Amino acid sequence: MTGAWSAGRIAALLGLLAAGVLTGTAGWLVVDLWFPAGLALALLGLFGLFLGARIALGTGIGVGAATGGWFLSYVLLGVPRAEGDFLLGSSGISMYAYLLGGVVLAVMCATISLPGERPLSAARNAG
């Protein structure tokens, strides 16, 4: 799906933004619940979302939309509530590991070169 912006492409980007919010919310909540296993589970969910976005749209813009939704969930969960407490506490290293791991996975999936995207070699076509 490389090319012009169509209605389907915009709808896919909005869907990936929503999927990023949902995956991020689930990930942020499960990281603090079960620290070592929850962190691995949350990062695997993010990797699946980011790689699926990259494959579905064929460019890094899909990963950017999913990452935007994931970060939006972090911002929304980190805002203090009316009671004065936070839904997402910053206790321990788990939140920072998930934040850093998610950024690394997003950059990795946005810059990966998939097998179908490689340019053809001129030497291979000549023979």
Image: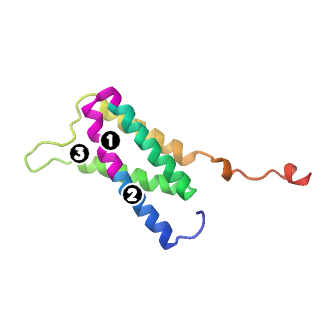
- For the point 39% across and 53% down, the residue is 68
Q: Secondary structure at mark 2?
A: helix
Q: Secondary structure at mark 3?
A: helix
Q: Which residues are magenta?
A: 22-37
**Looking at the image, is mark 2 or mark 1 earlier in the sequence?**
2
Which amino acid type corresponds to the residue marked 2 in the rendered image? Leu
- For the point 49% across and 69% down, the residue is 8
Which amino acid type corresponds to the residue marked 3 in the rendered image? Gly
Report the Cα–Cα distance between label 1 and label 3: 14 Å
Q: Is residue 125 left or right of residue 96?
A: right
Percent x, y for residue 2?
60, 63
Q: Disc 2 marks which residue?
A: 17
Q: Secondary structure at mark 1?
A: helix
Q: Disc 1 marks which residue?
A: 27
Percent x, y for residue 70?
36, 49
**Looking at the image, is mark 2 or mark 3 earlier in the sequence?**
2
Please name the predominant secondary structure of the magenta segment in the image.
Answer: helix
Dot 2 alpha-carbon crowd within 10 angstroms: few under 14, some 14 to 19, many 20 or more: many
User: Is-magenta flag for residue 36?
Assistant: yes
77 vs 65: above or below = above
Q: Disc 3 marks which residue?
A: 78
